[in-house]
Image (spheres, rainbow, N blue to C red):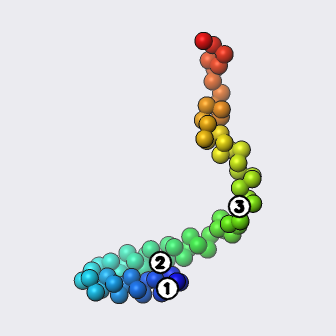
Amino acid sequence: MTIESWLQAAIADADRRGLPELKPLLETLARTTTVLRAADFNEDASGSALSAIRSPQSAVRNPQSAVRNPRAGQH
């Protein structure tokens, strides 16, 4: 389903439900979705680019390893 076909169906559904005020919101959502899908961060979805960010992610999963603890070694 394309964004345009989704938008047409969503607007028709809103009209059937008596909610014409949704039309500008649906149009904005469709435009925003189009822009996000065209963004360059979506170009490589294969996962191969993830190897470059694994190290920072591991620090996020274990914040203590990423933060220098001045009390480390003290009991």
Amino acid at circle 2: Ala
Discs 1, 2 touching: Cβ within 8 Å: yes
**30 versus 58 height, above or below:** below
Residue 51 image offset from top left, x and y in percent: 75, 53
In the rendered image, the vertical position of residue 54 relative to residue 38, given as above or below: above
Upstream in the sequence, badge 2 or badge 3? 2
Residue drawn where x is 70% and y is 48% of the image:
54
Judge the density around disc 1: few (<14), some (14-19), many (≥20) Cα neighbours within 10 Å: few
Q: Which residue is mark 1?
A: 4
Q: Which residue is mark 2?
A: 30
Which residue type does callout 1 highlight? Glu
**Which residue is at the front of the view, 31 or 74?**
74
What is the x, y in percent for residue 53? Answer: 70, 50
Contact, mark 2 vs mark 3 (Cβ under 8 Å): no
Q: Quadrant of residue 47?
A: bottom right
- Identify residue for label 3: 47
